[in-house]
Amino acid sequence: MDSIPFRRQPTWYGGRGLFAIQDIPQGTLLHTCPAPYASVIYRVFRKEVCGLCFAYAFDARRNAWNIKLEAGSGVWFCSETCRDDWIRDENVGQLVEAMNGAIDRLAKSMEKRAAGKVVLPVSLVKPMTQEDIDLAWAAAEDASLRTDTQPGWDPVLDEMELDTVRFVMSAIVRRYIQDSAQIAPLFNSWADLLELQNNELQFYRGRPSALASHLSIYTFVRRVVLSIPALAPYLATSEMVRAILARDPGNVFGMYEMNEEGDSEMLGWCMYVSASYFNHRKCYSFFFFYLHLSRAIDCAPNIRKERSGRKLLFYTTRDVALGEELCINYIDLKDNVTERRNQLAANWYFDCVCDRCKKELETKEKETIS
């Protein structure tokens, strides 16, 4: 299409969404996310997943990719073209190499000496408040500043926490690259990322132990950045790490192998900022000062997503009317209504009230009564 056929605007139920500003035919390639703002390939898959296009070696009937940077870089590629493009576009100033090396060295050094986890200055017995969270982050920031000059205590992270460190660091590197170039793709800047829903309070209330984990991750990231001066300004406070971690839950996409045989292995996760504005819910929208009642957007969405390498592509699944919200599904639509609603509440922090869910709940209630 010659112009962008949608706009980002507030929704009536909170947050932001994408709304059609013209009628859009079925099958239209509506939007392309060329690359994630932040991403991580699980460490166990690093030799099997291309660092640029995310191609999975097993899909190509290979056990692993054999094209890599120098030893210890932690990045493998499916082709020399991907390697060269990655060096040009992603490894500006060899920052990613420096980052991966610093993470691996620090992780090994932590294993060799006594270390622990961040001790929260708040009680987890009562429901967590925003004040509790702010206090904990302030205490961690103060402690991390002291360990910068007096090394000796550092948290030991498990494998998932180390992967989260790599995810956070990839976002910091992305911001550095965009700031240095003074240009960012549409809907994929740091400012755009900050407009994503902040799920910090809901996430920590549902998973209280995650707060201590995130504070340990922040402390570790601070230590990593000590060896990468170009990134140090972004860690002067905890603000950037906290902002990334607050938007990770509910706003990221799993990176799956691209097979056509059913179950797919999750290889890592990515944050595509513009893609996160595609919601999953029934909605009504205000459009050009008129109240426009859209068709129901429910657990049968009007947009489908498709991964092509590192790109995410979004197509309309039916004709979409002007003013209608553009929605994708977040879950397996074959699940029953209870499973769907539980997943959406636990992982995306809302109760789905779409027409399909309401009808299935009514049917379930009638069956229970009878």
Image: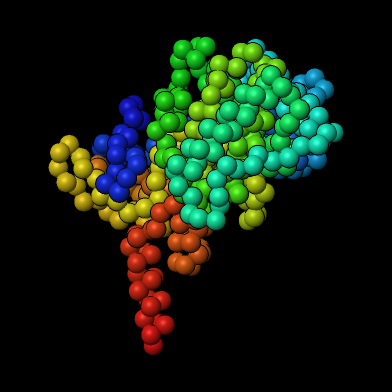
Question: Relative to 162, is 303 on the left or the right?
Answer: left
Residue 228 visible: yes
Q: Position of residue 356 (x, y in %)?
A: 37, 64
In the rendered image, which quarter contains the N terminus?
top left
Classify residue 23 by image quadrant: top left
Identify the residue at image location x=39%, y=70%: 360
Identify the residue at image location x=14%, y=42%: 290
Identify the residue at image location x=19%, y=47%: 292
Question: Relative to 348, is 44 on the left or the right?
Answer: right
Question: Relative to 341, is 236 on the left or the right?
Answer: right
Classify residue 163 by image quadrant: top right
Q: Is residue 270 above or below residue 345?
A: above
Q: Nearer the viewer, residue 191 or 4?
A: 191
Identify the residue at image location x=64%, y=13%: 229
Q: Is residue 13 above or below residue 247?
A: below
Residue 56 visible: no
Q: Position of residue 218 (x, y in %)?
A: 61, 32
Q: Nearer the viewer, residue 127 or 44?
A: 127
Q: Nearer the viewer, residue 124 or 40?
A: 124
